[in-house]
Amino acid sequence: MQWLNKVIQVFKIRDLRNKILFVLAIFVVFRLMASIPMPGISIENIKQFFDQFQVFGLLNLFTGGTLSNLSIVMLGLGPYITATIIMQLLTMIFPAMERMYKEEGEAGKRKFSQYSRLLTVPLAMLQGYAMLSLFQRQGAIGELTPIIILSSIVTVAAGALFLMWLGELITEKGIGNGVSLLIFAGIIASVPANIGELIAKWDSSQAPAFLLFFGMSLLIIAGVVMVNEGRRNIPVSYAKRVRGMKMYGGVSTYLPLNVNPAGVIPIIFALSIMLFPGMIANFLSGAGGFVGSAAQTVGNLFENPWVYGTLYFLLVCLFTYFYTAVTFDPKSVASNLQKMGGFIPGIRPGESTANFLYYILNRVLLIGALFLGTIAVLPSIIGGITGITAFSFLIGGTALLIVVSVVLETMRQVNSQLQMREYETF
């Protein structure tokens, strides 16, 4: 009953209780916005479209079910995440961008975030136009006049910016990462509908396959917990220093390196990138000629679970390394250790320490990236073997991966808040 005592303790602390209630209130606003459809929508046509192009089921998961309703926030947080990816890629190309993000402190990060917000606007409008044109050409929505198309693009772009604002509000005034929590809320909101659909379409002949997926889900949950909680502790010692009549230092501690320091971010980044080729291919498939045939070929490739799973696996591994390279700088850690009189036993301070940290980090990240990529694509591979057509099961691994990672990260932040208040009381 330790968890129950912790929940009671959380709601006894006014500040922490207000943060959690604030996050829940934002969730309510998000789901209300997701339930407001755009005018002139045929639900039957939309359902047929998603049955025909299952790759958009992943995008629907990513937007929290807003796309299948063609709601005013149907783009979800996709444009903002894409803008963030582009900006972080630019830090590896332009040294000035890298200095702004890593060396200018909080002011530089605020400026970097502002550029990401500005880039979200054209990306949201472009993606909104592409999605509306695709739906119109496939018959999911009726013919739209130029005025209605323009107003619809402005509406869905404003909806994407509104969700971006909600996510930043959660990060600033709530608890946890706002973007991850909104995606988590969208996935959880679709669970009752998925369970109802499973019960309505239950077929006893598919029971072994369903049991296999259930077992894989448990395996994924265990794997995500193990990877997110895994640590590689590097021993650090501090030299003794005498100041006045007191002696400082002379203690030993550990520098913890997470097996997967990027958390759920590589999955979100990989999903954002993987959605574009299939979406563009479906958009251009009706163009005719070489472009149309090439787009059709690409679309068929991305419908193949083996091709899709392989690319998904590689992107998850790549973004695990990429995001860690952006957020964790061994040179900075080595410099800070040297300034504080700390050193790793047997390793010279300075550049040697930084090289040692690079060496350890790359070895640890290899395990984390491979494991993260494997459990991300495992349900899709099993789906290709068993031939289950229910797309919700094919994306179950991704959904569970995001849900479990977000829950673990949020629990970690809640625990840190509780410990901080215990220290203050002490």
Image (spheres, rainbow, N blue to C red):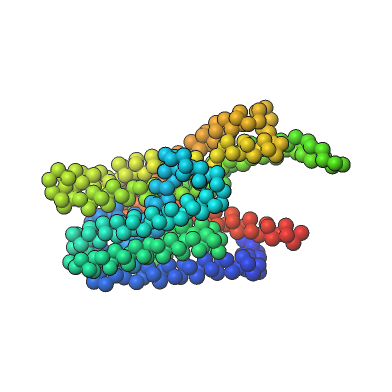
Residue 392: percent from left, percent from top: 35, 56
Residue at position x 63%, y 31% from top?
350
In which image quadrant can residue 15 be found?
bottom right
| Figure quadrant of the C terminus | bottom right
> Can you give x and y, in whole percent of width and height, for residue 218 in the image?
47, 51
Q: On the rendered image, what quadrant is the N terminus found in?
A: bottom right
Q: Residue furthest front?
A: 96
- Which residue is at 37% across, 68% downward? 34
In which quadrant of the rendered view does residue 90 lie? Answer: top left
Residue extending furthest toward the left: 289
- Residue 275 image position (x, y, % from top left): 32, 50
Query: Is 253 left or right of 186, judged from the image as shown?
Result: right
Residue 49 image point, x, y percent: 23, 60
Front-lying residue, 140 or 5: 140
Give the tally of numbered discs: 0
Any part of residue 252 in sight: yes
Q: Is residue 5 above or below residue 344?
A: below
Q: Which residue occupies 34% across, 60% down? A: 75
- Front residue of this view, candidates 330 and 423: 330
User: Outermost residue, right direction?
Assistant: 245
Query: Would you say residue 214 is visible in this rendering?
Result: no
Residue plotted at (47% across, 42% down): 96
Give above or below for 258 relative to 202.
above
